[in-house]
Amino acid sequence: MKSQILNKAIKLTLGCSVVAFASMSAMAELTVGFAQTGSESGWRTAFTNATKAEAESRGYNFKFSDGQGKQENQIKAIRSFIAQGVDGIVLAPLVTTGWDKVLKEAQRAKIPVVLVDRGLDSDSSLYVTSVGSDFTMEGAMIGAWLAVETEGTCDIVELQGAVGADAAIKRQAGFANVIQNFPGMEIIASQTGSWSATGGKEVMESFLKTYGGDNICAVWAHNDNMAIGAAQAIKEAGLKPSKDILIGSVDAIADIFKTMADGETNVTLELSPYQGAAAFDALEDHLAGKDVPKRITVPGGLFYPDTAAAEYANRK
Ligand code: AHR
């Protein structure tokens, strides 16, 4: 119950815009290229699967490229899509920089590009729209939760996402913006865990060694996989994750609800894996000559242990 009331309150105050998903406007068979980042996390895999299913349900000739965590692979994929003369390109940019050249090539070829999940720092005239969550708000929501939970007194360690990723940059800023208002709250260590459970575990082990578990009040993990790794490290250090050390993260993948139902993490914020539908809607509208807003924000909500077991049953 607490979770629904708080979610509604936060949404109302932050005034999130909502996207109506999946208006099934059927277009003549579209050939669409999707340049994905890779498969670095449970959320990424869920997002890829949902996007492939959405493309199939729309009857697209869908060309999927897995960037394997390298920007040069994504750039190569976009160039191949351009050479194939696709009708549109959907891009989940691995990092925020280095896209101007290839986006200009797509523009010269008159092939529209829709950004999904993450943004980039090129001029917005080079893409149709950017679909994604408000990453800054995500960081702020976890910061607000922790401030309430600890009454504004907490030494925090941060598990960052991959360096240069829009999600990591903005989540870090959003969280820091909130906790700077609380003199008793401080980030005592911050390092990338590469979005993975292994990475999260290794970095958390080094934090525990350096600072000692008794001196760490909470873990702020930019995604659930790293939070799951951190919980493992905390347990192996003989401490109770979510009790001795609080844990907050983002994504709401199925596995985090298992960990939360087991009493080992405290909160997660959902990042919708169904963003592909909104990206395809935008592309279809653009191709139909309709105006498309430059930014389309997808909503997300906070989840707590009181609903974790049910969420896990629904999502596993
Ligand atoms: O861009 C979104 C982030 O990318 C997700 O939170 C993370 O799990 C993924 O790797």
Image (cartoon, helix red, strand yellow):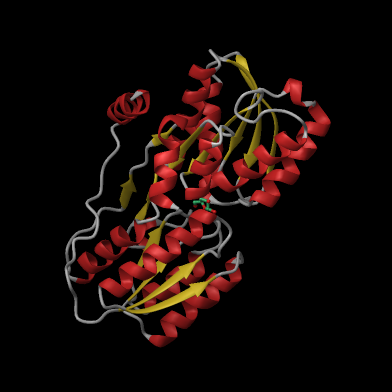
Give the image location of residue 205, x and y in percent: 77, 39
In front here: 249 or 177? 249
Residue 17 x/y as whole percent: 27, 41
**Residue 260 seen in this snapshot:** yes
Query: Is residue 145 shown above or below 57?
Result: above
User: What is the quadrant of the N terminus in the image?
Assistant: top left
Most extreme residue toward the right is: 209
Answer whether residue 91 is visible to the viewer in this image.
no
- Would residue 181 appear left or right of 197 to someone viewing this image? left
Q: Nearer the viewer, residue 251 or 254?
A: 254
**Residue found 61% across the figure and 66% down from its top:** 70
Expressed as whole percent of the image width and height from the top left, the position of residue 174 reads: 50, 33
Residue 200, quarter of picture: top right
Which residue lies most toward the bottom here?
84
Which of the two residues, 16 or 245, is positioned nearer the viewer here? 245
The quadrant in which residue 87 appears is: bottom left
Residue 135: x %, y % from top left = 45, 42
Answer with left or right where residue 36 lies relative to residue 19.
Answer: right
Residue at the image point whose x is 60% and y is 28% from the top: 242
Towards the viewer: 157 or 294: 157
Q: Determine the residue positioned at 19% across, 59% down.
A: 291
